[in-house]
């Protein structure tokens, strides 16, 4: 299966994205879109994923949230924070 583009995202296929891909979309790709499209894509992704931004220094919180299924990724251009992504259980 080829990788979905942002224009191909729907409620039916958004949950097929990996946590890593969602992290990239939400921290890099979304900034390249027009303002109206950003909100639409963000809302669509939020139907299938939960997000938490935490301090990169807070290892305890990272470990605690990891036990609940969050995967953490660096935020480009901000080394002080990590983006936590968790697939929602539907």
Image (cartoon, rainbow, N blue to C red):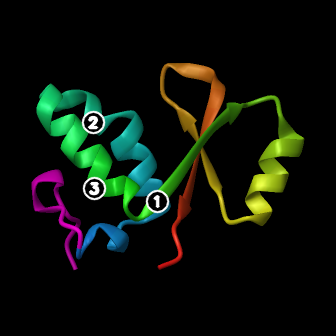
* Dot 1 alpha-carbon crowd within 10 angstroms: few under 14, some 14 to 19, many 20 or more: many
Residue where numbered disc 1 is placed = 49
Mark seen at residue 30: 2
Q: Which residue lies at the image location 39% right of the left edge and 44% below the top edge?
A: 24
Q: The N terminus appears in which quarter of the rendering?
A: bottom left
Asked if the stretch drawn in magenta spans residue 10, the answer is yes
* Dot 2 alpha-carbon crowd within 10 angstroms: few under 14, some 14 to 19, many 20 or more: some
Asked if the stretch drawn in magenta spans residue 86, the answer is no
Tag 2 or tag 1, which sits nearer the N-term? Answer: 2
Secondary structure under the numbered disc 3 in the rendered image: helix
For discs 1 and 2, the disc positioned in front in the rendered view: 1
State the extent of the magenta-drawn residues as a range: 1-11
User: What x and y, as percent, mark residue 70?
Assistant: 65, 58
Residue where numbered disc 3 is placed = 44
Q: Which residue lies at the image location 20% right of the left edge and 29% below the top edge?
A: 32
Secondary structure under the numbered disc 1 in the rendered image: strand
Q: Return the residue nearer the eye: 30 or 50.
A: 50
Say if 5 sits above or below 76 in the image.
below
Report the number of numbered marks.
Answer: 3
């Amino acid at each position: 299966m080829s990788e979905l583009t942002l224009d191909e995202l729907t409620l039916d296929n958004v949950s097929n994205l990996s946590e890593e891909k969602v992290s990239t979309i939400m921290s890099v790709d979304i900034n390249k879109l027009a303002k109206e499209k950003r909100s639409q894509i963000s809302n669509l992704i939020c139907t299938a994923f939960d997000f938490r931004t935490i301090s990169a220094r807070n290892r305890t919180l990272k470990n605690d949230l990891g036990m609940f299924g969050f995967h953490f990724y660096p935020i480009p251009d901000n080394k002080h924070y990590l983006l936590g992504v968790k697939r929602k259980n539907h």
